[in-house]
Image (spheres, helix red, strand yellow):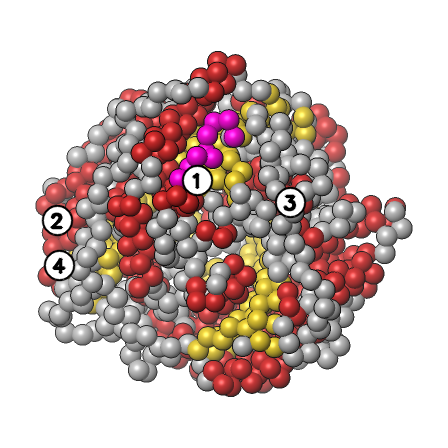
Amino acid sequence: MEVEGLAVEEAWTEPTGKKEDDESTEKMSAAALCVTVGSFCDPEDLPGLAHFLEHMVFLGSSKYPDENGFDVFLKKHGGSENASTDCERTVFYFDIRQQYFKAALDRWAQFFIHPLMIRDAIDREVEAIDNEYQLAKPCDTNRWELLLGSLARPGYPMRKFFWGNAETLKHKPKKSNIDIYTRLKDFWQNYYSAPYMNLVVQSKETLNTLENWVTEIFSQIPNNGLPKPSFDHLTDPFDTPEFHKLYRVVPVSNIHLLNITWALPPQERNYRVKPLRYISWLVGHEGKGSILSFLRKKLWAVALSGGNAETGFEQNSIYSIFMISITLTSEGYEHFYEVAHVVFQYMKMLQKVGPDKRIWKEIQKINDNEFSFQDQVDPITYVENICENMHLFCKQDFLTGNQLLFDYKPEVIANVLDLLCPQRANLCLLSTNNEGKCPLKERWFETQYSVEDIEQYWAAVWAFDFEINLDLHHPEENEYLATDFSLKAPDFPEVDYPVKVLNTPQGCMWYKKDNKFRKPKVYVHFHLISPQVQQSAESVVLLDIFVSILSLNLSEPAYGADTAKLEYKLVAGEHGLIIRVKGFNHKLPLLLQLVVDHLSDFSFTSGVFEMVKEELKKTYFNMLIKSEVLAKDLCHVILEHGKWPIIDKYQRLLKGISAESLSSFVKAFKSQLFVEGLAQGNLTCQEAKGFLRCVVAKLQFAPLAHPCPVQFRVVDLPNTHLLCKVKTLNKGDANSEVTVYYQAGARSLRECVLTELLVMHMEEPCFNFLRTKETLGYHVYPAYRNNSGIIGFSISVTTQATKHNSEFVDKKIEEFLLYFEEKMKLLTEDAFHAQVCSLINAKECEDTFLGGEMDRHWKEIISQQYLFDRLACEIEALKSLTKEDLIEWFQVLRGKDRRTLSIHVVGYGEQEQDSEFAAVLGVQGPLLGEHPQLMFLPPSSYMKNTAFIRHIKDFTSTLNLLPYHKILQ
């Protein structure tokens, strides 16, 4: 249907393959609106204006002027909303419980009919934009994208600074006497026009009802009569001398990465053939004959990805990017030209052989199978995808255009392949080894880089008809491709929850046949529990190395399974090895057998061992330099006794670990185990038992002499306010992470749901107080915390040291809680019951696909609590709560005996009095040398009377430990 030029797609939620009484997924309704205008339309003098407008339109409307009213309405009724700005599209979307959908639609539509865009809110929202920009700066992907855009022809829109920040949207306009408010209004009037918009709504109402609602509510969206902006006249944006060179870049992360990039004519029109998906499927293959298989054998690379994101900066109406990104080893870095040559040899092989119909049909079949048996998608995700599809595809392909291959046209594929030659490529080498060798700096993200011509020898080789490497060839036919999708007859009584069907001294197997989602899929998880793991920091590191090498050993033989949508994952858990396998049940036993065989016959070479150690160092390093990761790790290490911090693991790896110690660890690990498994889906009870018997028979391990705990004991925090304040380990990062945690202790299930409910009540006022009004940071959120059965809640803010002192933010969090305490006293029965209903609804909507149900049951098994009906128990507990219960519980948590822990990871900036310190150290780079240490900081004047932690182990050793606790009552 159309509403005055607004293209509309309605979706009626059809319950497919479910019990008649299962209405969990139908309780939520959703809508998405795509404005087919984005950052490419930013004015030259106001970079980031499209992104800024996306923020501003949601600050009230003429009909509903309350600035925060829509968010309050959604949170009250279990909903959520978000928006995003892309190069040529801006997408808005929300969801809410069905009975409030029409009222929410009316409020939401007003943002596109008559938004207020309050002048007084401009400075606050500029701060939000600037905070978002600061968070984006340390991301190497964002930095590379901005650098690549700067290589385009002058005047082309991909050269623009899409993010926006305080300089472009506040300081510079002020100096130039630009009225940002007027320009915002002009941009909205020029581009937020009905013909530019696509709308998708999904709900359980009839299509007639939805159509009537849309007509009634959205018909007032203005139509300015102007033609849509078009960039058809802009061609070959990257056909410049600057593009076809080698760029060396200093990354934030500790990586060696080679990006080989081609700029192609726009491929959106070829969506029915999907030539780039075909090519990326071959380039990204990891089986025999692939690029990565060859490079791994040379010990030059550990990972490779290739392709195109099919949207945004990588694909739009002007061009399409095709990029091959290779994670190099240290040796691979030294041979990066040879690595690039292998890639070009592979591309030449593809050009010479030409498109292969068998392979294209195989990809098509895999996509068809996945589409036919796909899991239920959350309504909000579904409508967001469809509203973008409406901009890209013909009407008959709105629902399928982004997933399926339709037409085999070898000439289309061949034309694209011919463009993927060395002479058209851009080479970008990101490495920390480039530090000090890169005199140039990108303007916005300050990325250090250098540019040079391709080395003469290789330029000459690639200019002529070089030889093809005979080790590179097409993949073989896939033995893992499923053909049997029938549902199996049961051999066990139907049950609501998993049942232990096999119990031995070596382990046990839980089983539940799926009768709810009725898909030909199976999920199998195993937890191989060993007391070896938590003995020392070294043993934790050895498990990480073991799992990394095992995954590497499996990558080539198991890749066919991966492409056939059979997935496996090996995880180094806190107390053992976790094996997860899922996918179509027809060939899944083949994959599980392959994993178990490689686990049993584990072996490694010295070269692989050294390569994996180096990569693991980089992994630990890259975790440590991210403030939010370090803050979470510190909190866990303080609270959970015996947990090894990332910094200890990194230090232990730097000291050196031998191949012999790995062999000894693996032998000891596999000698004594307790294996606990869960199988759910389209399989019989006998098959589930067979999986465990296969593991036990193949590994030949003895049972554990004593049960191994799968929890940590948690420290009992003192009745005071503690501060753990450390300096970020990335001195180029202004971002500070502030988390304030409140410990409730070992509690019952009833108090768990009270805490969840409390956090739910906090979400909107916390965001409004700390982000909207105080503009402390972009990421602001409260969270329910469960550390090994000990519950609590926390409030986190990501701020910038250039704007706020971390202790000032901590004090503002306390101010918010005082404000919230007064707000709770005024809580109405209506508001209380609305939030209870929303939380109940969320728990009733918990399992919308088999994987969600599996994850919930697996949490019970891996924690050895086995309360499989936890959701039902929590719902019953919620129904019994009163408003007075909630208020009283908050007062308990905030009483005079409250136990509070503040974690600050402090960035660099003038608000932290370290401008001189930063100047001495330089602008960019880590503080992780040969002997890395955390720098613990004392409190400043803001929190001068707060007890602070100088050394974590010394501090926690003085505290009592709470007993092991399981939340079962």
* Mark positioned earlier in the residue sequence (2 or 4): 4
User: SS of the residue at dot 3?
Assistant: loop
Residue displayed at 50% across by 18% down: 459
Tell me the mark number nearer the camera, choosing from 2 and 3.
3
- Report which residue position mark 3 lands on: 234
Tell me the mark number nearer the camera, choosing from 4 and 1.
1
**Magenta region: which residues?**
414-424
User: SS of the residue at dot 1?
Assistant: helix
Q: Which amino acid, mark 1?
A: Asn
Please identify the quarter of the rendering in which residue 914 is found: top right
Q: Which amino acid, mark 3?
A: Leu
* Residue 728 in sight: no
Marks 4 and 3, how far apart at CA: 59 Å
Residue 415 is marked as: 1
Marks 2 and 4, how far apart at CA: 10 Å
Marks 1 and 2, how far apart at CA: 49 Å
Q: Which amino acid, mark 4?
A: Glu
Tell me the mark number nearer the camera, choosing from 2 and 4.
4
Q: Is residue 458 left or right of residue 442?
A: left
* Mark positioned earlier in the residue sequence (4 or 1): 1
The location of residue 488, given as percent across then percent down, is 15, 67
Q: Are marks 4 and 1 in contact (CB under 8 Å)?
A: no
User: SS of the residue at dot 4?
Assistant: helix
Classify the position of the N terminus by image quarter.
bottom right
The location of residue 460, given as percent across then percent down, is 48, 16
Q: Are marks 1 and 2 in contact (CB under 8 Å)?
A: no
Q: Is residue 418 magenta?
A: yes
Tell me the mark number nearer the camera, choosing from 4 and 3.
3
For residue 612, above or below residue 875: above
Marks 2 and 3, how far apart at CA: 61 Å
